[in-house]
Amino acid sequence: MSTLSDFKVVVAGSEHVVFKEQIVNEMAESAKVRGTGIAKRSPDYVAQKMREGKAVIAVHNDGTWAGFCYIETWSHEQFVANSGLIVNPVFRKSGLAKAIKKKIFELSRQKYPNAKIFGLTTGLAVMKINSELGYEPVTYSELTTDNDFWKGCQNCVNYDILSMKERKNCLCTAMLYDPAEKEIKKIETPAETFKKRSKLYERFIRLKNFILLKKELITKNE
């Protein structure tokens, strides 16, 4: 079985366009197996993402294509989705999916540092990877309202459920990485957290002393 050291996981470029047909075909086959649909992409679309430096590809040391994922932007680049994650069936269970997700996440943060990165998934493995990267489960209302994104769900067998729920929820779990929210949490240093807790402790002590003093006065007056 192959290990991660047998692969190169890199930002895709023009030299990887030769894999476009294989990638698109595997995406379609994978969707059939899962019984869910994905936004259909043409080989030319995948090639364009590669040339723009908006995709990550994994290639085995022997030159075999191993995995792929690309970036899409929505709502005037306010939202970013890491789409089309696929691993060659020959190389599954080698940790490649996690490595590709991590690389495409880093690329997304580099290219769109202020954008919210989101995804919809039913896969527990993907949810776990997303959580490790800092994504959090959210309601659909926190995702992009861009109609072009939601049109991509039309090929899914659960699209009727999504439509019936007026895009408020479905069987997929929505996950979001909000850089602004992460920055707020990052700003609060351990010292500040300690200071906050210290102030709460001081208030507690003052309240405790006040109660004890009140009891003492009551006792004296009795």
Image (spheres, rainbow, N blue to C red):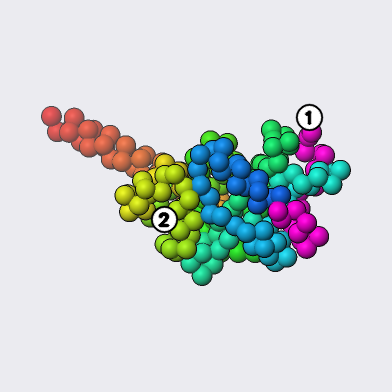
Q: Are marks 2 and 1 in contact (CB under 8 Å)?
A: no
- Image location (x, y in percent) of residue 156: 47, 47
Query: Dividing the image into 4 quarters, which one contains the C terminus?
Result: top left
Checking the image for residue 142, the label placed there is 2
- 14 falls in the magenta region: yes
Residue 74's place in the image compared with 84, above or below, is below
Q: Earlier in the sequence, mark 2 or mark 1?
A: 1
Residue marked by disc 1: 1
> Hey, which quadrant is residue 115 in on the image?
bottom right
In this picture, residue 171 sits left or right of residue 134: left
Mark 2: amino acid: Glu
Magenta residues span 1-21
The residue at the point 77 percent across, 47 percent down is: 65
Mark 1: amino acid: Met
Between residue 176 and residue 23, name the one nearer to us: 23
- 4 falls in the magenta region: yes
The outermost residue toward the bottom is: 76
